[in-house]
Amino acid sequence: MAITESNKLPRILVAGCGKLGGAIATLLTDRAEVFGLRRNPAEVPSGIRPLKADLTRPEQVTRVLPEDLDVVIYCLTPASYDEQGYRNAYVTGLQNLLDALQDQPLKRLIFISSTSVYAQNDDSWVDEHSPAEPARFSGQTIVTGERTALGSGFPATVVRFSGIYGPSRQRFLEEVIAGGMDPASPAPFSNRIHEVDAAAAIAHLTHQSLAGEPVEDCYVASDCEPVRLDEVVAWVRQQVPCAPPTENARKGGRAGSKRCSNQRLLESGFRFRYPDFRVGYREMIAISSTP
């Protein structure tokens, strides 16, 4: 019996199928045929069709790109953290992929961005309407990538993530426990999202796109409680034995001081499993303390 158009599985490409991209792709496999593109396809999670290509090499992208894609999720991180590395990841690679997609009938292009595009440093709230005028080359390059995605001719959505943490991203927690954090009080506001919620938010928006439901062109993806960095550090010290601050302990954050509003994401129907840092870090501490 022939498969009709109506019961074909949607086809989704995750370009940049690394830590976050792999988690997103895995969530989507139950309802879609998912392709994961990266330079080392052996590291693509099982259940996802691996594609080998370097997005800075347009001939490689053209050679492996599947046809009839419904959604493309662009989820790259820089191979090097200099200007060229950022441009390759957020601009050159994206443009090469868009050129290869040409006239494919995408329902949605989702571009993974960062709240580092906001330069606000006055404790103010930022949302999707706030000016994105970063002072650093990294944020400026990401903004260029956002504009490239939104100007691609495809229905496009930019998702700006705050700091992602979780079981596979424990650097901050380990730093506090080792005495490597000693922020002044009051410290700048910090914003974060658990890696489980980060992947789930993209899956949520993808499913809405495939269902033909309205999807905005930009979302801030951060948990429900911006909090000053010294408060987070103090809370962690109350939960688990920590070394005294070292002489070279870090005094502050690296991302200004702003409070990220997730109201638009909540209004889309998304619900957080880890709505604040206490829920997320408490679970991580409990797991690490289990014999």
Image: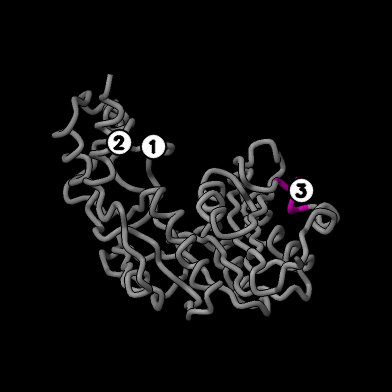
Which residue is most to the left?
238
Region of the chain picked out in magenta, as a range: 50-56
Image coordinates of residue 20 in percent, x first then y, are 51, 48
Disc 3: which residue = 53
User: Residue at point 40% right, 67% down?
Assistant: 220
Q: Is residue 46 above or below residue 210?
A: above
- Mark closer to the chain start, 2 or 3: 3
Q: Is residue 88 above or below residue 269?
A: above
State the image quarter where residue 178 is shown: top left
> Whole-Å distance between the Cαs marked 1 and 2?
6 Å
Q: Residues within 10 Å of mark 3 (few under 14, many from 20)?
A: many
Query: Which sits earlier in the primary sequence, circle 1 or circle 2?
Result: 1
Q: How is the image coloured?
A: one colour
Magenta span contains residue 54: yes
Task: For the residues labelled 1 and 3, say whether their Cβ atoms are less than 8 Å apart.
Answer: no
Marks 1,2: beta carbons within 8 A: yes
Q: Earlier in the sequence, mark 1 or mark 3?
A: 3
Q: Are marks 2 and 3 in contact (CB under 8 Å)?
A: no
Q: Which numbered circle lies on residue 72?
A: none
User: Could you tell me the amino acid type at mark 1?
Assistant: Pro
In reply to whether residue 68 is colored magenta, the answer given is: no
Which residue in the structure is indicated by mark 1?
A: 167
What residue is shown with label 2? Answer: 284
Mark 2, Cα crowd under 10 Å, few <14 / some 14-19 / many 20+, is: some
- Asked which quadrant contains residue 47, the reply is top right
The quadrant the C terminus occupies is top left
Inspect the image, locate mark 2, and give the three-letter code of the amino acid beneath it: Met
Q: How many marks?
A: 3
